Image (cartoon, rainbow, N blue to C red):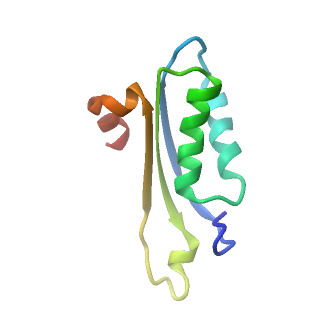
Amino acid sequence: MCPHHLLPYIGTATVAYLPGEALLGFGRLADLVRCFTARLTLQERACSDVVDALMQHVGARGAGGVMKGEHSCLRIPEQRHSTSVVTSAFRGEMQTRAALQDGLLA
């Protein structure tokens, strides 16, 4: 939900991490994304929060995320703008390895 307009945005999240000591299953990654997107928050903040959580709480060597969203507030009134908003965040080794970033952004 967009905190500015109290309207939903719908989209996808692509998340990757370089494991340190712990491994997460796909379900846990989905739960993590849901945790940060099921509240009033900016898409940019949710993307950063997911990546930061992987670094801080899972001990990842690197983490990255890309979120693509279609925001209801851009579509009204009269379906004015039909566009997607893309945000990304990279931390640790993912910040310095362009090949890994390109894989998420593709």
Specify the quadrant of the image occupied by residue 54. top right
Residue 28 percent across, percent down from the top left? 66, 29
At horizontal 34% and vertical 36% (from top left) the residue drawn is: 101
Image quadrant for the N terminus? bottom right
Residue 98 percent across, percent down from the top left? 27, 33
- The correct choice, above or below, for 68 with respect to 19 in the image is below
Q: Nearer the viewer, residue 44 or 27?
A: 44
Specify the quadrant of the image occupied by residue 104. top left
Image quadrant for the C terminus? top left
Specify the quadrant of the image occupied by residue 84. bottom left
- The correct choice, above or below, for 13 with respect to 100 in the image is below
At horizontal 66% and vertical 67% (from top left) the residue drawn is: 3
At horizontal 54% and vertical 47% (from top left) the residue drawn is: 47
- 53 relative position to 38: left or right: left
Farthest residue in the bottom direction? 78
- Total residue callouts: 0
- The correct choice, above or below, for 98 with respect to 35 in the image is above
At horizontal 60% and vertical 14% (from top left) the residue drawn is: 22
Q: Is residue 100 visible?
A: no
Q: Is residue 99 visible?
A: yes
- The correct choice, above or below, for 101 with respect to 22 in the image is below
Residue 80 percent across, percent down from the top left? 45, 84
- 65 relative position to 41: left or right: left
Q: Nearer the viewer, residue 64 or 34?
A: 64
Farthest residue in the top direction? 21
